Image (cartoon, grey):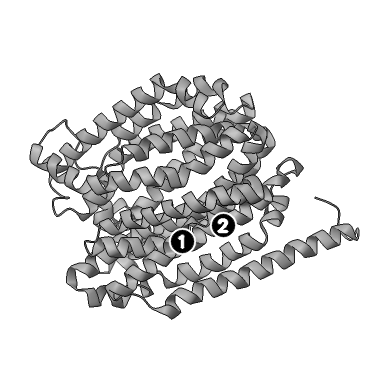
Amino acid sequence: MADAQDAPGGGLNNRLRAFASALSPTSVRSAMARSGLAVLIGSLAATNILRIGNNLILTRLLAPEAFGIVGVITSISVILTLVTDLGFNVFIVRSPKWQDVRFLNVIWTIRLIRSAALTAVMFVGAGLFSTAFNKPELTAPIMATSFLFLLEGLRSLSPLTALRERRVSFISMFEFAVFIIQMVVTIAVALVIKSFWAIIIGMYAGGIAHAVLSYTLFPGYSHRIAFDREIGRELWAFARVVIVSSVITIIIGQADKIFIGRALSLDLLGLYMLAVNLTTSALQLVATYVHRVLLPEYSHAAEQSVATLRSIYYRARWRLTLALAFLLGGGIGGGHLIVRILFDERYLGAGVFVSLLCLAPLFSLVTKPAEQALISLGKVRSALEANVVRLAWIVIAAPLGYHFFGVVGMVAAFALIEAAAALYWWVRLRIAGLFDLNGELAPMALAVLGAAIGLAADKGVDWLIAQNFIPNF
């Protein structure tokens, strides 16, 4: 009998069946799992490139004050989130019960109650919050965004259990899809109304998409309201340290926005917040990489032995750390040039803020992996101790910076918080037997090289403009 391959059209049919099989959900997930790191880096790179493009479009559709308004609202949301932070994500990923349906339902219920409470607090307290920032005209926008907390509480916990299963690539693509939806809606609405409300509407589009897709793309079960005192006590025992650490994080991460928000007009605040948006992309990239890739990797290695963790601590993050250190160094030296290239002349004042704020993600390449490695070894209090170091730094450096250099000096003090924390983590890494001097110095050397190149490029462009070799832009 003739083989099916020899029959007329048989080869084509087989190829079509193979192609269809390759595109099936199971095959796609398998392929993504095999290339998890590549997908993560690719999606993060694409997200940050698109975020820059999004800012390019929005800065041409909206006035600088729009970014100031959204920055104030975001700061209030972050403050409320951190005040009530119970560490749900890390608690679930680290827990041996992460596959237990009742355990997850109890945690989901606690998180939902917290989200509903935050919605009520932000809605009722909108007037007080706007007054605290010396911007009473923002009461209505603050009230309007309060329900984003409720949307967050309704999300499924399935992405977190998928993280525990090391389905890094699938989670990356899921969040990339949410980002695309939010970006498209924001730009589409901004084209019509040309107001900061476009950004708020986009935030709701992203929140709804995240909640819906967390169930449809991670099928298995639907959450139910459930209570369990033992699980609650277990969460609280973990969260006590997290809450204290988070309160300090509020002071560290939001004090600059509160003081600057009160001192500057919405236009100038918009320049600062635009710089924050640009550099936050780098911070998010580092945090996402550490949480999605290094935390599960370090936790798995720590379960075996400290020696196993020591063998992979630097190797697991080497390539991304070196590349980001060089790029962030370029941002430090060429912040003004970056703003000149990306935005119109209304936003040139953001350049100095970009240069300073690139310091934070640079030193987070040291602090974030170290924190997760120590937590993997059960040293949860180390995160609190590091935040105490950060707080001590800001209490001393911020007033001095403001006294001698004004707002720019205060921004510099806050930008160097992670540098102060890096000293603490180096000591803790040495005590834990994980520290390697060459592993820490190599990224810093590349950052210095990048800064020199960025500064030379910035000064070179200024000279070319002054000599009329190129037009001012």
Indicate the position of residue 7 as horizontal and vertical percent values: 33, 64
Report the amino acid beneath label 2: Cys
Decide: is 235 above or below 335: above
Give the farthest residue toward the right. Answer: 468
Indicate the position of residue 263 as horizontal and vertical percent values: 61, 35
Residue 245 as seen in the image, left or right of residue 416: left
Which quadrant is home to the N terminus? bottom left
Crowding at label 2, few (<14), some or many (≥20) Cα neighbours within 10 Å?
many
Secondary structure beneath dot 2 equals: loop
Instruction: Give the residue displayed 63% in from the left and 56% down from the top.
Output: 355
Which of pointers 2 and 1 lies earlier in the amino acid sequence? 2
Is residue 244 visible from the viewing direction of this image? Answer: yes
Indicate the position of residue 437 as horizontal and vertical percent values: 42, 79
Is residue 23 visible from the viewing direction of this image? Answer: no
Indicate the position of residue 390 as horizontal and vertical percent values: 42, 54
The residue singled out by tag 2 in the image is: 358
Relative to the observer, which residue lies in front, 212 or 408? 408
Q: CA distance from mark 2 to mark 1?
A: 15 Å
Can you tell which quarter of the image residue 427 is in?
A: bottom left
Report the amino acid beneath label 1: Ala
Instruction: Give the residue displayed 12% in from the left and 33% down from the top.
Output: 227
Can you tell which quarter of the image residue 9 is in?
A: bottom left
Relative to the observer, which residue lies in front, 357 or 293? 357
Kindly indicate whether the residue at mark 1 contacts the one at mark 2 (C-beta within 8 angstroms).
Answer: no
Q: Which mark is residue 420?
A: 1
Secondary structure beneath dot 1 equals: helix
